[in-house]
Image (spheres, grey):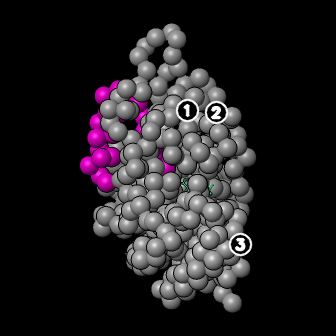
Amino acid sequence: MKIIDLRSDTVTLPTEAMRKAMAEAELGDDVFGEDPSVNRLQEVAAERMGMEAALFVPSGTMANLVCALTHCGRGEEAIVGNQAHMFIYEAGGMAAVGGIHPHAIANQSDGTLAIDDIRNAVRTDNVHFPRSRLICLENTHNRCEGAVLGPDYLQSVVALAREKSLRIHLDGARIFNASIALGCQVRNLTHGMDSVSFCLSKGLSAPVGSLVCGSKDFVREARRRRKLLGGGMRQAGVLAAAGIVALQQMVDRLAEDHENARRLAAGIQSMSAFRLANPPQTNMVYAEWLDGNVSADQFLAETNHRGLRFLVTGHRRFRMVTHYGINASDIDRALAILADVSRQLGRISH
Ligand code: TLP
């Protein structure tokens, strides 16, 4: 029985083309800057993002941390959404490692930070306050249901950052999902950002790796922070080679994942046991199960046992993510399993 694993797009496995490229990759020592495959990936990535330079790092978490450490010193402040991956899921890295004070403000349900809220969060020059340095945005927004932040909104934050002499970091772990959903170039979404991170190992299916993008000066400093964190890898070209294939071959097909997410959402919406807050904008479907007598453990046990996996992300809230390796018939099977499980649990709890 094929397990339908919708826990995350991080579970994707490398394609045949990636494995071949990895086996044949030209290699060198990347700490000396001498791995041709890493150098090529960094050039391709910078070009795609419309930024001057890029740096290959092992994970999205390290990419965000390297950027925060490069922008902010100890005791300085980063304005960040209270639903942001950087705030919730990165082990408090900016505070723990960098002494950076996260100033969390409410994310709107569409993934944005309200411009007035950002404005109010910026500190005045007063000896009592930490210094505001950085605004962090996330596109697509993971905990806000894979929401897309559009170019107009992004430009309004860029304008505010310029006015207040702040920098902006964009956690673009799934920036290509945003560009595919909007039908625009990624560079339209990165314009004016001081740094952008994006992941190769999510919807793009590469096995490992993320990129930090910014100006040449920024990336030179970021390289030093990467070293500090132990992220300087040696013959990292074996990984970068897969990343190049990911950027060349795996971006356009993200549209299929979005289509499958819509199919999944429509099916879930038609079942009385579940409530779907919003139709998906990208590859994430968030829903709630309505029966208060059913625990997360019961729900997961029943679905896992039938070969369907996903994550519970809050009180009766669950997340399903579509990705490479999941097709429309897998979605139909997932829906059949959910229908079966909701009948079964209905019998247990009533
Ligand atoms: N997100 C993972 C989990 O950590 C929740 C997932 O399954 O969605 N930024 C964003 C917006 C992310 O969603 C993630 C991973 C990261 C950064 C971190 O990337 P990695 O896992 O490579 O450190």
The answer to which of marks 1 and 2 sits earlier in the sequence is 2
The residues tagged by marks 1 and 3 sit, at their Cα atoms, a distance apart of 37 Å
Q: Could you tell me which secondary element the residue under label 3 belongs to?
A: helix
Task: Classify the position of ligand 1 by quadrant: top left, top right, bottom left or bottom right.
Answer: bottom right
**Is residue 37 depicted above or below 232 in this figure?**
below
Q: Is ligand 1 less than 8 Å from the beta carbon at label 1? A: no
* Residue 216 visible in the current orientation: no
The residues tagged by marks 3 and 2 sit, at their Cα atoms, a distance apart of 36 Å
* Residue 191 visible in the current orientation: yes
| Residue ID for mark 1 | 102
The quarter of the picture where residue 258 lies is: bottom left
Residue drawn 70% across and 65% down? 297
Q: Could you tell me which secondary element the residue under label 1 belongs to?
A: strand
| Residue ID for mark 3 | 301
Q: Amino acid at mark 2?
A: Ala
Q: Quadrant of the C terminus?
A: bottom right
Instruction: Locate residue 132 relative to residue 73 in the image: left or right.
Output: left
Label 1 crowding class (10 Å Cα cut-off): few <14, some 14-19, many 20+? Answer: many
The answer to which of marks 3 and 2 sits earlier in the sequence is 2
**Is residue 88 depicted above or below 318 in this figure?**
above
Q: Amino acid at mark 1?
A: Pro
Residue drawn 35% across and 29% down? 119
Q: Could you tell me which secondary element the residue under label 2 belongs to?
A: helix
| Residue ID for mark 2 | 95
- Which range is magenta? 150-171
Label 3 crowding class (10 Å Cα cut-off): few <14, some 14-19, many 20+? Answer: some
Residue 79 pos. (x, y %): 47, 33
Q: Are marks 1 and 2 in contact (CB under 8 Å)?
A: yes
The residues tagged by marks 1 and 2 sit, at their Cα atoms, a distance apart of 7 Å
